[in-house]
Amino acid sequence: MNMETNIETDLLVSTVRRFVETEMFPHEEEVDRLGHVPIEIGKAIEARSKELGLYACNLPEEVGGGGLGIAQMALIEREYGRTSHALQSWAARPTELLMACDAAQRERYLLPAVRGEKRELFALTEPDAGSDVMGMKTNARRDGDDWILNGSKHFISGPCMPDFAIVFAATGVDETPRGPRKRVTAFLVDVGMPGFDCREGTKCVSYRGYKTFELHFDNVRLGPEQVLGEEGRGLELSGKWLGMGRIWVGATCCGKAERILDMATDWAATRKQFGKPIGTFQATGFRLADGAINLRAADLMVNDAVARAEKGVMSDADAAMIKVFCSEMLNKIADDAVQIFGGMGLMEEMPIQRFWRDSRLERIWDGTSEIQRHIITRSILRPLGA
């Protein structure tokens, strides 16, 4: 990443890079083949993450986290991006949404997550409501002081069976200048509660080993102490997570793109045809040049978004631009790498096909490219009344 560095940031990057290369790289092929992370491998990564002070490094020191800032987290996410989510997710960064916990909830959910005693899922997406959050069907109705939760979620990702989920549900309807709008509330729901069925979902060809879960709620009774934040303010909570989440996606895309580009460059410099390295032919060399240009541009965009976020002025459109540009940059570099490797790029014995498959998901999760472009378009037109 092209940004000013100092001894501390250099040490952070070198530490994380060494962690990724020694604890995760060696297991990539096995995990992709098995379709899951063997528990002993996951636990070893988790333990090493704690030893290095990287576990929960995104949360404040006051709750036992590492207290790293936005710029430092961007560097970490970029390094983690060089490997599979299936592996790096064991070096956990609990969601910042848990900082909305009240005192009792901190003891029950936040602090155990920081210590690695519990893991959570962020449960927003539904079978009929992916990017259309207002199409959410999961709902919670009042019953005295309690809430009765019904509905389902899918494509909820995580490395292993969770201990609890942060579930978003409609709890009413508010009238707004733009018409009726669902009131959405976040709930902390423990796995194993009566009526809550949490199971592994469909398998994805991208990031094999990174699980998806299906969550089903059948009259799950929740007490008022299980509301996260304020009733009706769930979308504000999710927005905070999704905004920075899209910056982290951009950073991880840059890390993965760098690794792919390095491999493609080495191949182009050593693979010969017609007596010359294939990289000396314009058709191949220009792919490398375009990749280097786009990676540089993506890194600079991430740096700019990080600077805006640190000043508290990053907009939804800023985050959307990062998500679109970086994910599509990565996809182009991955696709070009397959072309540079030729037939070998599609062979299972080579890692390029795996990077190609993994890269494709980045244009879909955390909001598709189409949704991001909609957000950007809205930011351009709304000030003009359109």
Image: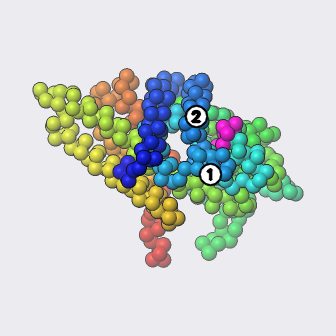
In the picture provided, is 385 more to the left or to the right than 176?
Answer: left
Q: Is residue 343 above or below residue 335?
A: above
Q: Quarter of the image holding residue 82? A: top left
Q: Which residue lies under the disc numbered 2?
A: 51
In the picture provided, is 70 more to the left or to the right than 350?
Answer: right
User: Earlier along the polypeptide chain: callout 1 or callout 2?
Assistant: 2
Identify the element where label 1 is drawn.
loop
Label 1, label 2: how far apart the Cα atoms are: 18 Å
- Span colored in magenta: 114-123
In the image, farthest residue toward the left: 275
Q: Is residue 214 above or below residue 174?
A: above
Q: Which residue lies under the disc numbered 1?
A: 60
Q: Position of residue 300 (x, y in %)?
A: 36, 55
Can residue 330 be spotted in the picture? yes
Front residue (pair 203, 211): 211
Residue type at the position of mark 1: Pro
Q: Residue at x 31, y 33 (%)?
A: 263
Q: Position of residue 194 (x, y in %)?
A: 81, 39
**Mark 2 surroundings within 10 Å by alpha-carbon count, few (fewer than 14), some (14 through 19), many (20 or more):** few
The colour scheme used here is rainbow
Q: Position of residue 95 (x, y in %)?
A: 61, 48
In the picture provided, is 243 more to the left or to the right than 194?
Answer: left
